[in-house]
Image (cartoon, grey):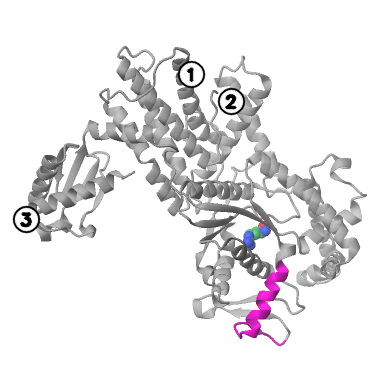
């Protein structure tokens, strides 16, 4: 489907040729959406055309405007403000766009691009449950994946589980010492929370040991290094790396608990993966890459045996790739994982959704892979996002620092129940359906509020504001959709026809068609920018415009049949577009609420 820019740009080019017997270069045909307060749909800049017209901007505008109107019946009027020609399209033009929309299957989505994109998101450590930061991560990952699919790309969603290392040994050790054999079943505690409890316990005891040592005269640094607990955890890691049977078995058991817990959280949140990578499998291939880099002379081995890459020419520093004792670091496994993924998928782009505290790590990873000679390294894109916080005093977990993902979702569903019971008439809805609805609204509020904000920005998640049925919120969009669906249900009960009739469109209807018409372009732009926020804000513009229209227009009570039939069609497409857009955000829209 051609966009209005493309259409007008062709008309403009035609007009210049007709007027001045010369072709304007594409770069001189500049069109923008007309500013809100000015009459018109698109504005053409005259300045780049003056070389061809050899006239003043005003005169050029007048001539071009007149020519456009003469040659093209779909241009209704024009006006000139300084060097800007504002063009207004006719109702007939927008009527044709409505026809396009009505006749397009999967409206908004683009045809297959042939490109494969791998997107990694979530990527938790296995020593504790997911928190609010992971929620932003998972929502971004899931919706960017949907967005890229809507742009026609083949998308592979992957997760990296950092399942080995000192962090998980801490939980394991504390469980061994103080757990008395507790399991998720025996304790009734969700697996990831149970393991997290022991991580907290380790930390508390470790801190106690450190202050004891400091009281005996050790420095803080010495105390941190010499506390018996940390020494034991380190010994446990060495035993793990040697493949010690007992430790491996404990590690497997506890990780299994954690995965069961994570899966439950993912299910509630509504995210999935095509493939899960485990650090315990990929760190070894990372070591192989490093050996090869040494052989090729790209990497340096220091006297103590540690291996480094020099990134100083590129404005970074020297980066450790392997410790002196041969054990691997965070970077090691990322080298291996990236290469494995390329071999499996031959991706055209690899996106990592990871918080901005790791900006430096991903700059270094990309550069290191480039230097090691992997041409696909240039396709790596770090989708970096800012911190998300809650207003003070809200739902802080026991440790007092992080907000637990499961607790927050539960709280949202609870609030949705309270709000809906106040605002909606749901008495005739079966209880299980009500419960599903509250989940849809609670999670819709959470997801929308987080996704409407540009990923780069630090944000405050305000649970109360997020669920306001009349605000810039998910529930507002959901409610708009449900409202339209209710009208369409009534129309169906009355067996009213729905379709294009060519009935004259009013100004408000044209406004709505304009917004609908922009949907495919919006999906393109949001995909290019890796930004679901553009889609979220789009749904708000559409819903707001629709509500104004619906407030002042009758649909079911419209006496003119042709108008009624076409209005129902418009409603159908507003609802359909809201649904598609919200689907991209990973948000369900209810049929009623
Ligand atoms: N597990 C890491 C953490 O919690 C994040 C992993 C990000 N992904 C990656 N490929 N390094 O900090």
- For the point 45% across and 29% down, the residue is 575
Ligand 1 under 8 Å from disc 1 Cβ:
no
Closer mark to the observer between disc 1 and disc 2: 1
Q: Is mark 3 on a helix, strand or loop?
A: loop
| Nearer mark to the viewer, of 1 and 3 | 1
Displayed quadrant of residue 168 = bottom right
In the image, taking residue 93 as reference, residue 195 lies left or right, namely right
Residue under the image location 25 percent in, 38 percent down: 37
- For disc 2, the marked residue is 419
| Residue 134 sits above or below residue 537 on the image | below
Q: Residue at x 67, y 45 (%)?
A: 403
Which quadrant holds the C terminus? top right
Residue 388 as seen in the image, left or right of residue 32: right
Q: Distance between the residues labelled 1 and 3?
A: 59 Å
Which-is-in-front pick, marks 2 and 3?
A: 3
In the rendered structure, find residue 489 and report the number of the disc placed on it: 1
Camera-nearest residue between 459 and 149: 149
Q: Is mark 1 on a helix, strand or loop?
A: helix
Magenta stretch, residue numbers = 283-303
């Amino acid at each position: 489907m051609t966009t209005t820019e493309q259409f007008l740009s062709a008309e403009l080019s035609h007009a210049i040729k007709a007027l001045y017997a010369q072709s304007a270069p594409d770069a001189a045909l500049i069109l923008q959406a007309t500013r809100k307060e000015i009459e018109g749909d698109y504005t053409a800049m005259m300045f780049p055309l003056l070389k061809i017209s050899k006239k003043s901007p005003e005169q050029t505008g007048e001539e071009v405007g007149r020519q456009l109107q003469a040659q093209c019946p779909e241009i209704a009027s024009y006006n000139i403000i300084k060097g800007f020609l504002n063009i207004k399209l006719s109702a007939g033009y927008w009527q044709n766009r409505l026809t396009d929309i009505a006749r397009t299957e999967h409206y908004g989505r683009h045809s297959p691009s042939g490109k494969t994109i791998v997107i990694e998101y979530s990527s938790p450590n296995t020593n504790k449950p997911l928190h609010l930061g992971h929620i932003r991560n998972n929502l971004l990952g899931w919706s960017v994946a949907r967005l890229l699919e809507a742009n026609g790309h083949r998308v592979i969603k992957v997760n990296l589980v950092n399942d080995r290392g000192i962090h998980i040994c801490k939980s394991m050790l504390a469980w061994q010492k103080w757990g008395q054999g507790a399991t998720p079943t025996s304790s009734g505690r969700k697996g990831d929370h149970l393991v997290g409890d022991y991580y907290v316990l380790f930390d508390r005891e470790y801190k106690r040991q450190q202050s004891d040592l400091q009281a005996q005269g050790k420095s803080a640094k010495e105390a941190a290094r010499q506390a018996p607990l940390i020494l034991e955890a380190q010994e446990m890691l060495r035993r793990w790396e040697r493949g010690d049977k007992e430790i491996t078995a404990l590690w497997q058991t506890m990780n299994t608990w954690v995965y069961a817990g994570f899966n439950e959280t993912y299910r509630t949140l509504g995210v999935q993966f095509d493939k899960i990578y485990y650090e315990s499998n990929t760190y070894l291939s990372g070591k192989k890459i490093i050996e090869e880099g040494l052989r090729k002379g790209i990497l340096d081995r220091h006297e103590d045996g540690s291996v480094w890459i020099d990134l100083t020419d590129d404005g970074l520093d020297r980066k450790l790739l392997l410790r002196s004792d041969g054990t691997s670091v965070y970077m090691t496994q990322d080298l291996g994982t990236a290469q494995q993924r390329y071999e499996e998928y031959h991706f055209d782009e690899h996106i990592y959704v990871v918080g901005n505290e790791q900006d430096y790590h991903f700059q270094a990873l990309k550069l290191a892979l480039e230097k090691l000679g992997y041409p696909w390294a240039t396709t790596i894109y770090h989708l970096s996002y800012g911190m998300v916080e809650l207003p003070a005093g809200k739902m802080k977990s026991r440790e007092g620092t992080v907000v637990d993902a499961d607790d927050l979702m539960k709280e949202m569903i609870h609030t949705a129940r309270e709000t809906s019971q106040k605002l909606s008439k749901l008495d005739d809805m079966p209880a299980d359906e009500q419960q599903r609805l509250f989940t849809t609204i609670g999670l819709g509020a959470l997801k929308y509020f987080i996704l409407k904000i540009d990923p780069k920005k630090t944000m405050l998640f305000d649970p109360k504001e997020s669920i306001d049925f009349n605000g810039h919120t998910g529930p507002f969009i959901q409610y708009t959709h449900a409202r339209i669906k209710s009208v369409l249900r009534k129309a169906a009960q009355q067996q009213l026809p729905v379709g294009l009739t060519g009935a004259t469109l009013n100004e408000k209807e044209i406004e709505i068609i304009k917004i609908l018409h922009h949907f495919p372009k919006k999906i393109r732009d949001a995909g290019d920018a890796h930004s679901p926020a553009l889609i979220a804000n789009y749904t708000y513009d559409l819903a707001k415009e629709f509500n104004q229209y619906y407030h002042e227009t009758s649909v079911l009570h419209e006496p003119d049949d042709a108008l009624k039939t076409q209005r129902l069609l418009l409603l159908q497409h507003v609802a359909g577009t809201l649904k598609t857009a919200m689907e991209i955000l990973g948000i369900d829209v209810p049929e009623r609420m």
